[in-house]
Structure formats: C-alpha cells, structure tokens
Amino acid sequence: MPDKLQHIDTWVFDLDNTLYPASTHLFPQIDKRMKAFISNALKMSLDDAFKLQKQYYWTYGTTLRGLMLNHNIAPDAFIDYVHDIDHSVVAADPRLDTVLARLPGRKLIYTNGSERHAINVMDRLGVTRHFGDIFDIRASSYIPKPDPAAYADLIARHGIDPKRAIMFEDIHRNLKPASDLGMTTVWVKHAENPAKPDEDLSHCHFITDDMIDWLEKAAT
C-alpha cells in the first residue's frame, strides 16, 4: 500500500458504472425504464419524458428528486419500477473480488440507487462478502449525491472519519462534497461522463479509467 494511502480504513464505492464498468451497459436499462415511468405517470410522450428526466437529473442530482418535489411521485414506486431490470448482463469479476480482499479496512457502497439493486449487482459480480453495508437513496432520506447533507448522513450513520476514507465515483461532481469533507477521492472516468474542458477537477485526487487496475497498484 503506498504511503499516501496507508491511513485509509474505509473504502466507499459508488455502484453504477463504478463497481462494474460502464461497458457492461446495465445502466441504459435503468435509463430506459425511467423514461417509460415518467411517460406513464405524467401522461407525456417518451421524447418529452426523456427531456424531463435529464432536466431533473442535472437540476436535482437524481430524476427521482425532481419527480418527488415537482409531481409528488411516490419514491418507492419509481425505485421498484426502474430497477426491475436484467442483471444477468453483469458478469462475475474475479479480479475485483481478489483486489477487494487485499484492501485493509471496511468497504461500503454509497449509491443514489436502491439497496436491492446494489445487492443484485454485487451478487452478480461475486463481491458481496466484502461489503459491510449499503448506503442507498432510502438511507439518505431520498437526498441524492451531490447534496452535502447526504454525505453528512453517510458519515454519521457509519462513523466514518473522512480523513481516513477514500471514495470511488464515476461522476466527478459527486466527489466534490467528499473532498470538501477531507476524503481522498478517485474519479473513475468513462466516455459517457466526460468533464468539460474548463471544469475544475481539483477535487479529484486521482483519476483512472480502470478502477481495478488502480486498486491492484494501490494494494501492492
């Protein structure tokens, strides 16, 4: 373990497009079901539903938050519908399993999705045994990343010392509150979530397009 990571005792992982690679194409299933849910619930075309979905995502952090605040949508109905997907596209990942076993300290999942979805993904990957808990959107009272209040809840609930924690996330703006709290941050970048040319990435202490490779080097 490099000296700069020797102090880490809590490893916090985002789920979608982070714990598994974006190339798995699991999240597009969720994206499609969000659009269908909005179209049915608000009686609008799929095109208009898609526009609203993305508008709320960028404005509120999650589409769900926008639907709750503006349309009084019941969150559990939305969550259960959009995560009713085919998880079989996620394959077992022995490399991830091996490197997680080598990391000292506890591992947590922090996701804007649901606990059930996280469990399904971890089971498919074959890494469930490594994670002590899941902090999902229900645990955060439906307040999504990157709202700082959700990070405060995460830290309080799990007794995390931010200065001894590291967070992995594919959406770099979701790392800003973690960095502000004192966490070490790793941006797992991919083609679907690029940074704009003029964006400040100083809150991303490490940047990688291959999280497992990064972890393997960190664990040596």
Image: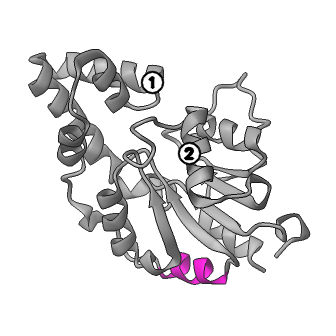
The part of the chain drawn in magenta is: 94-102
Residue 45 in the image: above or below residue 24: above
The residue depicted at 74 percent of the width and 42 percent of the height is 181
- Residue 65 showing in the rendered view: yes
Front residue (pair 152, 67): 152
Tell me residue 36's x, y (percent). Answer: 15, 32
| Mark before the other along the chain sequence, 1 or 2 | 1
The residue depicted at 55 percent of the width and 55 percent of the height is 157
Tell me residue 161's x, y (percent). Answer: 74, 57
Residue under pointer 2 = 153
**Which amino acid type is marked by label 1?**
Tyr
Residue under pointer 1 = 60
Residue 200 in the image: above or below residue 4: above
Residue 41 numbered tag: none
Q: Point out the image quarter for the C terminus.
A: bottom right
Q: Kindly indicate the quadrant of the structure image that contains residue 32.
A: top left
Residue 40 in the image: above or below residue 144: above
**Which amino acid type is marked by label 2?**
Asp
Instruction: Please say whether residue 199 is one of the residues in the magenta stretch.
Output: no
Q: Image check: 115 left or right of 38?
A: right
Tell me residue 64's x, y (percent). Answer: 32, 31
Q: Secondary structure at mark 1?
A: helix
Crowd around label 2: few <14 · some 14–19 · many ≥20 (10 Å): some
Q: Point out the image quarter for the N terminus.
A: bottom right
Q: Residue furthest right?
A: 3
